[in-house]
Amino acid sequence: MMNNRIYTADKPFVMVIFGASGDLTKRKLMPALYSLFKDNRLPKEFSILGVGRTVYSDSQYRSYILDEIKKFIKEEDQNETWIDAFISHLYYLSIDPAIESEYGLLSCRLEELGGEERPDNVLFYLATPPSLYGVIPLHLKKWKLNTKNSRIIVEKPFGYDLESAQKLNKIYSSVFEERQIYRIDHFLGKETAQNLLAFRFANGIFEPLWNRKYIDYVEVTAVENLGIESRGGFYETAGALRDMVQNHLIQLVALTAMEPPAVFNADNFRNEVVKVYESLTPLNEVDLNEHIVRGQYTASNSKKGYREEKGVNPESRTETYIAMKLGISNWRWSGVPFYIRTGKQMPTKVTEIVVHFKETPHQVFHSADGNEHPMANKLILRLQPNEGIVLKFGMKMPGPGFEIKQVTMDFSYDKLGGVPSGDAYARLIEDCILGDATLFTRSDAVEASWKFFDPVLNYWNSNADAPLYGYPAGTWGPLESEAMMHEHGAEWTNPCKNLTNTDQYCEL
């Protein structure tokens, strides 16, 4: 159950989770921390202090987490001895994180757990509503809890637009140094997302082809087969662009499009990400009208429409689906469209990047599927489910003639073994403990991303008649998004065309 990797620290390590009784903590953070614990990847002396308004004693909080954590840990990873040992490291402090005076209690508790007057090896995790993102750091500063080696992890969305993101960055930079700030994007914690970099930069067969000369277009898809569930209040203030596009999807675009860093370290890697954001072709009026399609799911069969969900305005104009065409104005990608999309209530849950290569310059064979020419090569990098890489290329059909059929070379990431591929939060929390900021978003990247997407929000806000297309729950979104692709002679790659509302991933 254990490996040889042991991380030690000179001082006891304390992780403080604001929002410790919330959904994110029990679903993601505690299972991730348990995974690190059982694999001996946490500091030898550590404590986890939950902070929230819900009233718990230490023992009550431990009982609560003990009951909840078993629901979110894989059956094969459940070991009573290890779970009990992990739970014994949990503590709880009942305060209102919005009230500055109550941070005196937090300071006292940290001194108790850290074993010194002002503990310095502390990680603060903000698993709270975004309304507290700008409040908590200032309160920490007031009570001098922003020590030299403390770190803070903040969840998305980091701001609601460029102006609010700049204000947040100003607050955080007044409290912490940039090296102490970890803006988390769990997509980058997925092994397949990181493997995209290895695939590109460690293999001489593909890197020479990774440019406008050989690539026709790129798709980035991240869709879910669920609605907003109980998050109506939050989603009404966010929408798909803020919730998924400005952070997750554009990060995946950056991984696909970035230049290789001269040396692979946090600063160089993040420099190249920012360069991609700064190279995004500014959106003009044609783009805003024709190359962005927003939608909202409507009732279908037994599924509710978005406007019927709890906490949603019955006349809501909030988008649950968005598809966009992006351009990157640099030497590598000029003229290559990037099509991105995300949506709720899709036929299946899938996140993948599809790289479409150009057809051969001169076609001499016929396709076995009735098309005049064989299909162009296609590379699929699948982040979820069943993480892996698929390469599609043409081969001759057995028998007489030279009819070409597209075949698949499929690699599943679980064949490599090692750390569970689905444990994205565990990887990122561990990186933060070790002070490795490579996979976290830097302040200039946040602002560069918002600078690009702000015109979209402004356009929607100032044009009440900007189209919002309905699409039945369980379908692949508005038909208008297909029309946007046809402009390039392209089509969306839709896995599981014949399945509805299933987690099963089917081949193309």
Image: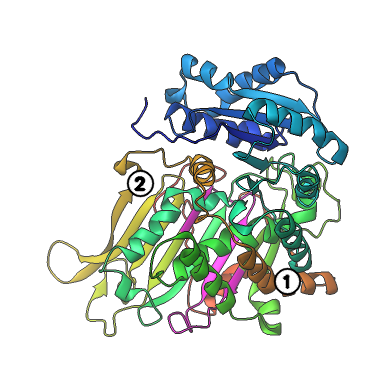
Q: Name the residue under label 1.
A: 454
**Residue 385 in picture, x, y percent from top left:** 46, 45
**Residue 461 in picture, x, y percent from top left:** 83, 69
What's the residue type where badge 1 is placed?
Asp
Q: How far apart are marks 1 and 2 (CA)?
A: 36 Å
Q: Which residue is drawn at 70% across and 77% down?
A: 288
Q: In this view, does 466 lie to the left or right of 337?
A: right
The structure's colour scheme is rainbow
Q: Which residue is drawn at 72% across and 42% down?
A: 145
Per the rendered image, the range of residues in magenta is 324-352
Element at badge 2?
Answer: helix
What's the residue type where badge 2 is placed?
Tyr
Residue 413: which disc?
2
Q: In this view, does 238 lie above or below 371?
A: above
Label tally: 2
Q: How crowded is mark 2: few (under 14 residues within 10 Å), some or many (20 or more)?
A: some
**Residue 306 in picture, x, y percent from top left:** 75, 49
**Residue 203 lies within the magenta run:** no
